[in-house]
Each structure stands twice: as C-alpha cells, then as structure tokens.
Amino acid sequence: MSPTTALERLARSPIVALCGVLAALFLLYFCGTERAAAERTPGVIELELAFTEERFSGIVDRWAEAGALAVQQRNLWLDLLFPFAYAGLLTGLLGMLALPSSSNLSHSWRIASMLRNLISWK
C-alpha cells in the first residue's frame, strides 16, 4: 500500500474525528488544570525538561509541598498520551488534503486554517 493510499484511507475513517475530539479535550483539560495549579509550582513541561536528578526531585518535592502531586501525576500521564491524539488528527487532516475531489481547493483552505489555529494555540 502506498503512503498516499494509506493517508486517503485514514482520512475517510472516524479515527480522525476521534483524535480531534481527544486532542480538544486534552487541551481544555490542560487549560483548566493550569489555571487551578498551585501558585508558583512548575508544570509537567518543566518536569519533562528537568535533565538532572536534582531538578527532577526538586520539582516533585515542590508539588508534594503544594499538595498538587496527585494532580500533576495525572497530568503527566495525559501529557504523554496527548501527542498520539494530536498526531492522529494532523495525519488525518493531511490525508484529507490528499483526497481527490472537486472541492479539493476549498477543502484545503479549511484544513490549512484548522492547522494554523492548532499550531498557534497558546
């Protein structure tokens, strides 16, 4: 199966819609937990970028002191799952661009607009 055929099949499947819904739910959840996070505690991204054991332990200790350890552990798991939903959505949208149709140009503009909005989020 050629890559173009695989993209076309993916674009026609409901997986793209599911990935889009999951990606949107993840983003909404992350916005809500970021606002509800304890004052001056680092987020999951800071933990992922803590390249030393001391920094990693320090971040986890600050979460424990602020009472946010359980929430941040859940956020870490969700943050690890988010790229899969986001990649599925983007791959499906690219597959839609590969679909031959009479309205391919208008389809392309809509998808390009959605991609621009997703990429520039936050």
Image: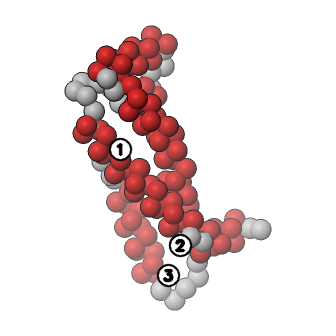
Name the residue beneath numbered marker 3. 104
Q: Quadrant of residue 24?
A: bottom left
Instruction: Name the residue type under label 1.
Output: Phe
Instruction: Name the residue type under label 3.
Output: Asn
- Name the mark nearer the viewer: 1 or 3: 1
Q: How far apart are the two marked residues, 1 and 2, measured between alpha carbons? A: 29 Å
* Residue at 24% across, 24% down: 40
**Count of marks, rendered view:** 3
For disc 3, the neighbor class at 10 Å (few under 14, some 14 to 19, many from 20) is some
Q: Mark 1 falls on what kind of element?
A: helix
Instruction: Name the residue type under label 2.
Output: Leu
Front residue of 116/57: it is 57
Q: How far apart are the two marked residues, 1 and 3, measured between alpha carbons? A: 34 Å
**Horizontal and vertical percent for residue 72?**
39, 31
Decide which of tag 2 and tag 3 comes sooner along the chain.
2
Instruction: For the residues labelled 1 and 2, say whether their Cβ atoms are less than 8 Å apart.
Output: no
Decide which of tag 1 and tag 2 comes sooner along the chain.
1
Mark carried by residue 30 = 1
Q: Quadrant of residue 106?
A: bottom left
Decide which of tag 1 and tag 3 comes sooner along the chain.
1
Give the side of residue 36 with respect to residue 22, left or right: left
Front residue of 38/110: it is 38
Mark carried by residue 97 = 2
